[in-house]
Image: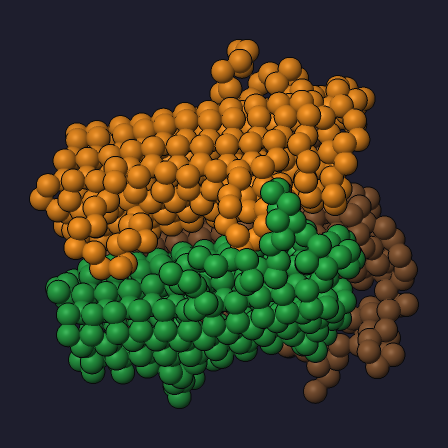
Chain colours: A orange, B brown, C green
Amino acid sequence: MISKNAVIHESVKIGKDVIIRDFAIINEGVIIESGVEIGENVIIRSNVHIGTNSYIGSFSILGEHSANYYSGSLNYVNALLTIGENAVIRSGTIIYNDSKIGCNFQTGHRVTIREKTIIGDNSSIGTLCDLQGRLEIGNFVRLHSNVHLGQLSNIKDFVWIYPFVVLTNDPYPPMNQLVGVTVNEYAQIATGSVIMPGVSIGKNALVGAQALVKKDVGEERVVVGVPAKDICSVRDLKNDKDEQIYPWKDYLKDFRGYPWQEK
Amino acid sequence: MISKNAVIHESVKIGKDVIIRDFAIINEGVIIESGVEIGENVIIRSNVHIGTNSYIGSFSILGEHSANYYSGSLNYVNALLTIGENAVIRSGTIIYNDSKIGCNFQTGHRVTIREKTIIGDNSSIGTLCDLQGRLEIGNFVRLHSNVHLGQLSNIKDFVWIYPFVVLTNDPYPPMNQLVGVTVNEYAQIATGSVIMPGVSIGKNALVGAQALVKKDVGEERVVVGVPAKDICSVRDLKNDKDEQIYPWKDYLKDFRGYPWQEK
Amino acid sequence: MISKNAVIHESVKIGKDVIIRDFAIINEGVIIESGVEIGENVIIRSNVHIGTNSYIGSFSILGEHSANYYSGSLNYVNALLTIGENAVIRSGTIIYNDSKIGCNFQTGHRVTIREKTIIGDNSSIGTLCDLQGRLEIGNFVRLHSNVHLGQLSNIKDFVWIYPFVVLTNDPYPPMNQLVGVTVNEYAQIATGSVIMPGVSIGKNALVGAQALVKKDVGEERVVVGVPAKDICSVRDLKNDKDEQIYPWKDYLKDFRGYPWQEK
């Protein structure tokens, strides 16, 4: 079902059972695999490849132009943006050209993802997240709403990051001598924390809410405060039933399709 | 005045003196009462009821689909979204299906309101606020910009919350055993504060800016800091003229149409 | 190149070599100078003047209506919005009527700028910034993403402000007796800081990340913490090569077209 109100360049390749809704605009060189739904008012700029059965929400822009476009160069070319199969890109999301995203990707609304972002499989990026590009995200990562990732951030598999967390990258602003933050597997960074440039957060670590993390955090350590201090091992934490709960992978058996899930 | 460029399903019921602007898309089962204005490029999905004299800003989406929609179920049905009379929904706002909003509702731009949100009368939600659904907001509540309300939040009447405040709900992330925050009548939560899961903020209390609130806050108490400490009664606070100013209901007589306003 | 799918009022004045893309809507009294590109789905309300060679990104709204519009007054009139030459307004940005913006202005995506905002030349406002209006920004100012400026804020030349910083203005919320923040030349305010109402940040000062600034900050001073404390002169700071780096104007010689740039 392709709306008569959509504007589709003649070069666009469209698979079977594709839905394109009213007022969508699809430019040259775009490839849309089978079973994709393109929502109302979506804009797809040139050189975008959308995997099978993906959904692109209304008012999204895929393959957004880089800054060079605006300088009026006649030679401007959009680099390839690839989105894997089964994506759910919610409305208002902007993904720049020149990035590569794996399968089963999900976004909330109005996410921004800039150039040279590499995202693995099964990851999810919440509403209003702001990914500044030149960064890497692994598999099964989950960013809640409004997470800000500076350039050179490196997020390993199964990390969760909560609202308004910022991974910074400029130690001497505004010098712009960037050094990224690394967050290792299974780490949790709670709401409102700021991680300073170059810091590494250890595997299974837990950063408390509203922290300012200036030094590396060791594996399985808990840090809290402004500036953050190391207060205990995650193994010392108990829930309100006095049960151990971290490292969470060992205690969270039934959870949203994770690969170690027991059924 | 209904634009020829709008796409309106034949089942839509439209009252008197309704304006529908260019490129609006209105789906089946929508009811639009008299005097409503639907802005340019608005999308109204199925089963939405918009009250008399309301304004729906450009690029808004009302009745947004739940996650089940994307799994491709043929049986997917949108639940009813009701918006009361005299609403002003500013542009880019997304309100999911299955919520109920009272009269005189106002939003800023690009607000997100998810399913099972109940909002009373005369409340206002600022630009870029992110309401995660399964939550309740009373009457005459005002959220400033970028407030994040986790699921199970409960905001009583006349509460004001300022930019970038987060009401969290997951005490042992990412366990997802949610417990909501309650904010009682007239409380004020200043900019950038984070309220931890299950905390109750007392009536007429004041939470200072940038606080991390881990424990319940008593009625009329002031808390500040990371973590927040109880420092005094709100009755101990004075303005720069050495006047008592809290509880603010007692001192704020002439204010934006509040019901106790003296004229 | 003007799209047949655009809706353009007959009174609009359009210069040479203007591009207007699909589904753009341009209302009465708009003046578009030569070389401007208006992106897809842009809405330009009445009485907007766009300078030469500017780019207006998709889904942006220029000249957004003030609150009085929604009360249904028949006498409502949009005040003039002027945008200087060579602007790059990225997609989803909303700029209200009754503001004046200089040349070489840049925005990220989904910026909000309310009425009575005055911005000088060569300034840049990042993605999702929220400018509440009745404020002033100088020349060569750079706001990173998600900066929130309350009304009456005053930002002098060459200031940089980082993500999620808030300049507040209401000392006794919700009294609404506003007093603005002033940030003087070359000051840097790092990620996540909150500046309390009426505070002045001195020339060349540095506010650390996640600070809560309640008192004036002197020229060339460094403040950190919640609440912020004055810890040293910016001249005491060294980078990882043990080099002095502040005041940054003296050390940052080759940078993005600043007027003192040596080539």
Q: Can I make out residue B80 in this image? A: no
Q: Nearer the viewer, residue C85 or B214?
A: C85
Q: Is residue A39 left or right of residue C134?
A: left
Residue A167, by quadrant, is top right
- Where, quadrant-wise, is the N terminus of chain B in this rendering? bottom left
Residue A228 placement (x, y as % from top left): 74, 39
- Where, quadrant-wise, is the C terminus of chain B in this rendering? bottom right
Residue B59 placement (x, y as % from top left): 36, 59
Residue extending furthest toward the top: A262
Residue C22 placement (x, y as % from top left): 19, 60
Looking at the picture, does residue C141 appear above or below residue A12? below
Which residue is drawn at the image coordinates 85% and 50% (left, top)?
A: B229
Residue C119 placement (x, y as % from top left): 46, 74
Q: Is residue A233 left or right of residue C21?
A: right
Q: Nearer the viewer, residue A263 or A62?
A: A62
Looking at the picture, does residue B105 appear above or below residue B128? below
Looking at the picture, does residue C256 appear above or below residue C34? above
Which residue is drawn at the image coordinates 45% and 45% (left, top)?
A: A132
Which residue is drawn at the image coordinates 44% and 36% (left, top)?
A: A135
Which residue is drawn at the image coordinates 41% and 25% (left, top)?
A: A121
Q: Can I make out residue A187 in this image? A: yes
Q: Nearer the viewer, residue A70 or B2?
A: A70
Looking at the picture, does residue B38 appear above or below residue A182? below
Q: Is residue A173 left or right of residue C172?
A: left
Residue B18, by quadrant, is bottom left
Q: Is residue C149 left or right of residue B221?
A: left
Residue C50, by quadrant, is bottom left
